[in-house]
Amino acid sequence: MTHSTTAEPLNYLNHKTGLWSWLSSTDHKRIGLLYLYSITIFFCAAAVLGLLMRIEKIAPGQTIMSAQTYNGMFTIHGIIMVFIVVIPGLAAVFGNIMLPIMIGAKDVAFPKLNLFSWYVYISGAFLGLYSQFANGHSPDTGWTFYVPYSAEASSNVVIALTAAFVLGFASILTGLNFIVTIHRMRAPGMTWFRMPLFPWSLYATAWIQILATPIIGITLLMVIAERTFHIGFFDPALGGDPVLYQHLFWIYSHPAVYVMILPAMGVVTEIFPTFSQKPVFGYVPIVFSSMAIALVGYFVWGHHMFTSGISYESRWFFSFLTFLVAIPSAIKVFNWLSTMYGGSVDLKPPLLFAISFIFLFTIGGFTGLTLGSLATNIQLHNTDFVVAHFHYIIFGGMGFAFFAGIHYWFPKIYGRMYNFRWANISWGFLFAGFNLLYFPLFVIGIQGMPRRYFDYDPKFQTGEVISTIGAFILFIGLIGMISNLVYHSKRGAIAPANPWHGVTLEWQIPSPPPHENFDEVPVITREPYVFDHPHTN
Amino acid sequence: MKNHENHISSDTLNWTVLVILLILTTISILAIKMHLGAFTVALALILASIKVTIVLTYFMHLKFENSLLRIMVGGVFLLFAIVIAITFIDYYFR
Amino acid sequence: MSSTEHSEHIDSDTGKMGMWLFLFTELFLFGGLFIVYAVMRSKYAADFHHAALELNAFVGATNTVVLLVSSMTVAMSLTAIQQNRSGKAIGLILITLILAGVFMVNKYFEWGHKIGLHLYPGSDVMKTMPHGEIMFFGLYFMMTGLHAIHVIIGGILLTIVIRKIQSGKISSSHYLLQENAALYWHLVDLIWIFLFPLLYLIT
């Protein structure tokens, strides 16, 4: 590590140098950065795979890759994006860096375990990568590993399953660490209802992580047992039930969607009050809606299986609960909008990303309800409509919240500021490219274009071409944004401790934070979002 | 360390708990010989649940921990029961 | 870790809470198998009844008693260390380890017997059996196998505890590790309390 100035005060970035000081650090901020860098690298790799798939689909028939390659590609794209990027995503990066600071702690409850989690994570990530390049075909089951195909496919499914298992373990350990941290490490005076809302969202997330992830763990082990010992749980020829796999898979993987989106909601909930200079509207409802989402979200897994032959009664039940879980999400949207209402709104890049999060998440949410109602689901199941909905939630929701978060906390993390103009232009490309890329998929999905298909009917070509153009525009935006951030993390103007006039604890300490976060333990005497000099009317 | 708060279980208590657990095990083994039909499994599960509760309460010291931990443990078992029940909304009606 | 790294001192309540949360994940790990069991049993009640006859309830009951007693000895070893009687604590953990060994030996012969009869997943004999019995033996091997792995991990943890008591790192004022290892061992017992009736007593 080199330093541009030697007179810089000591902080967590420069108090020790050298690669090993990073790889052996139990400092939550450094571990958060390790996650940030590894997630960014894997995100870029999987995004390139996505772009290649879009190029393949620019015309019907084979253009740049074979059908088998395409199958491998959407599988690896899915495995990397879901298990390596998005599930750890916001919680592991911003949760690690900000959670202890925001609750006034020096570190998480178990710092060594925290570092260990990262090593587990990175081993799982490399194992996932290895499944792509090991002898034989890269896995071609889709990230959902549905039986019976995953039990029979000759590709490297076992390696990919093991990778997902290991990554799940890392996720569990992070969740465990956060729950204990929030219970035990809050600063004096920080009661539960004086805790900022990002930690609250992490708390709800962490419970899902520890209570849902083991189910996928054992399920993946069962598929491995199916492949190696023909144990038969999912094989109808031996008396097993393939739909049971889908139950078990979605008992985890539906709550996993909330593992992804809850921290994203938490991040934008921090951003709106700061850039409106106004207390968050409805603090308590936001808290309870997070917990309600976590709880009810645990019971809606069956809406992924409406066409799989589950009973009518359970379809009715799952559809009903799916509509129920939309309520707390909608409550949050109203809270964010009301927070901005009447505030002195300052449209800086973090807010720009946060507002586009609301827009995209709302589209994703509404189309989710379209999929959640029984009649329309039959028509739309396994079409590109699902792909579009999924990406509006995961990329438009979680991805844009991540971008919002990194633009928000960047000056705190690096002590430097990025270029606003550059950030705004990149946002324009990202936002336009995103909608061009995914919105046409809603349309051709309704018209009947199935997902995960390598080839398509020529009548869908207009939609596919617009989508591919969108992918290129999105890529320009990504390159612009990442280069802006990377360049200015070293060479940007020195940022003040509190550039956005935020009121939560992380803005009350120097940027970058000192190694131990606080010189003296802060004592909290009031609610989290009280602005001393409100700019409100 | 706040070990002064920690409860110390006497050996007598531990022995008592073991004896009760062994009695319950014996009952559950004898129960199957009574040919209770459909109730056999129900009875076996009820007895197992009682044993598990005893282990949690005394051997695992839940009785002496703060109520937060007890609520968490209860919640986790409840959550699992609900998951099983919801799964059976499918299987029971199929 | 060097002195400038964060303090690694973890207080007892914090450490115990972490362990409990970990135990929750273990419960749900087995929970997935219990879901499969519940579904398959409701589907093939008669076959399960029949297949369970193949298991020796006496061996299962013996192992139940062995684990219950070992649970008590671990609980007593904790009492001993709290009373600063480290010799007694080590002795009780050693008894626990011996009981764990007895459990594993029983399990070894039980599995060996089944495998000798070609009653294992994927065998030719199995393929000719009714569907429900195939499911039963699949569950039997997977559940008891996963449980046996936990017995081994618990045994390793308890061995570490003995070493730490000997070196004085665990004492009447610092025994978090022993508490957590004991909790883990009780979990192993707890899982078995459910497995025993579900696998051996449904005849």
Image (cartoon, grey):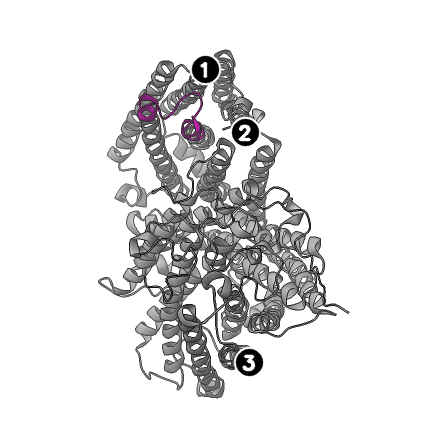
Q: Residue at x 33, y 24 (%)?
A: C162
- Magenta highlight on residue C182: yes
- Magenta highlight on residue B32: no
Q: Quadrant of the C terminus of chain A?
A: bottom right
Counting the numbered discs, the total is: 3
Residue A240 visible (yes or no): no
Q: What x and y, as percent, mark residue A301?
A: 55, 55
**Real-space Cα separation, disc 1 to disc 2, in angstroms:** 31 Å
Q: Residues within 10 Å of mark 1 (few under 14, many from 20)?
A: some
Instruction: Give the residues in magenta.
Output: C162-183
Secondary structure at badge 2 equals helix
Q: Which mark is residue B49?
A: 2
Q: Residue at x 29, y 49 (%)?
A: A228
Residue furthest out toward the top: B12
Q: Is residue C152 left or right of residue B66?
A: left
Q: Chain of mark 3?
A: A
Same chain under badges 3 and 1? The reply is no
Q: What x and y, as percent, mark residue C139?
A: 39, 40
Q: Residues within 10 Å of mark 3 (few under 14, many from 20)?
A: some
Identity of the amino acid at label 1?
Gln
Q: Residue at x 41, y 27 (%)?
A: C178
Nearer the observer, A293 or A492: A492
Q: Is residue A528 left or right of residue C115?
A: right
